[in-house]
Amino acid sequence: MTITLDDVATLLHISPHGKIFDAPLNMNTNNAARAAHEYLGATWEEACIEISYNNRLIQTNQFECAARTYLLYLVGCTIFADKTHTRVEAKYITLFIDLHRCRDYSWASATLVFLYDNLGDGAVHDTRHVEGYMTLLQCWIYEHFPRICKRGDRGAVPAHLPRASRWTAKHVVEGGLLAYRRRLDVLLLEDVVFTPYDDDRANHPFVSISMFFGYLRCGGVSVPYLPERCLRQFGRIQCILRDVPPMPNSIDSVWQNTMRSSVETFRRIYPVATFLEEVTADYYAWHVSVSHPLILPPSTVAPSSLHTTVVAHAGPSSSAHTGRDRRAAELAHRALDMVTPFSEIHDILSELCRLYDD
């Protein structure tokens, strides 16, 4: 599974249609100061001070400059959020030179490229913070994995609001990261919602461009966008994946010129599923052979941690029953690590482990 253009468009209510944003690659100090001076309304001296010391700059009588400054602040706090927290890369000023043309960009693809790229960095073991729009990632988890973490539900939202406004964050699960990893390891197919927006398409229509297959780009960053790897999110039968295609010479040209044919090809070669979890007969065996079905290796799960989890959720019971529950939970988890993933016995043991952990 992954975050698709349809997820971005539905959750954030921003369009995937439009041209790709091409940021200048040589935005040095002088170019940044010149852009702030010309497009944000600062004097040259103010621009140089801002670039050097991050002081505020804006002239209140220049409304277009004020609009650019606000929009720069907006994207810096949301879709292009990074680890600096209080600063925005000067290259994004070029997005707002012509305020009337801002809508011409594919904001959803820019959001997705920035997030994809930084999630890749976040997978490195010593990374402590992740860049990108974490509200998008968090709400995507709420939609597709409702049983992994707590969430507050405000109910259906009007069509003019992003669907992400439906959700409110709750406190983290007791046990931290290890608890989340355990919950992921015992997930069943019925715990995953592949198409969470089906009941809300009247307000948030499906975006067919999300079936585009190829590469997306934002400035100097390019990422593969491969919807065939998450076909069940499109209501299609999941099949064995093809290799990642080579990057074309011109991503922009492919995006603009082959978008419609790419979507038509997707619809033609990937049949609609008769039920949401449908896969081809050879898919699961292939998936197990090329992936790591479990996050936690058996050797990293200490028996004491399993006991703690069970006791925390066991509720009032006699000490004898508690002891038996602890032992049963430990045996269930040990057995789960010994069976073939996606088999019937694996599903049964996963459900049993989840019941003990809850």
Image (cartoon, rainbow, N blue to C red):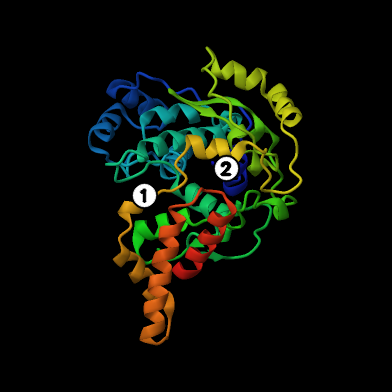
Badge 2 or badge 1: first in the primary sequence: 2
Crowding around mark 1 (Cα neighbors within 10 Å: few <14, some 14 to 19, many 20+) is: few
Of residues 212 and 328, the one drawn nearer to the viewer in this rendering: 328
Which of the 4 quarters of the picture holds residue 24?
A: top left
Q: 346 or 21, which is in the foreground?
A: 346
* Figure check: 355 above or below 181: below
Disc 1 target residue:
297
Left or right: residue 127 compared with residue 173: left
Can residue 147 be seen?
A: no
Which element is circle 2 on? helix
User: In x, y percent, where is residue 208?
Assistant: 70, 35
Which x, y percent locates residue 97? Answer: 49, 27
Q: What's the mark number on residue 8?
A: 2
Q: Which of 219 and 208 is in front in this view?
A: 208
In the rendered structure, are the residues bearing label 2 and label 1 in contact, judged by CB atoms less than 8 Å apart?
Answer: no
Residue 279 falls left or right of residue 84: right
Circle 2: residue type: Val
- Which residue sits at x=34%, y=70%? 307
Residue type at mark 1: give it: Pro
**Residue at the image point whose x is 36% and y is 32% from the top:** 89
- Image quarter for residue 132? top left
Q: Is residue 354 above or below residue 244?
A: below
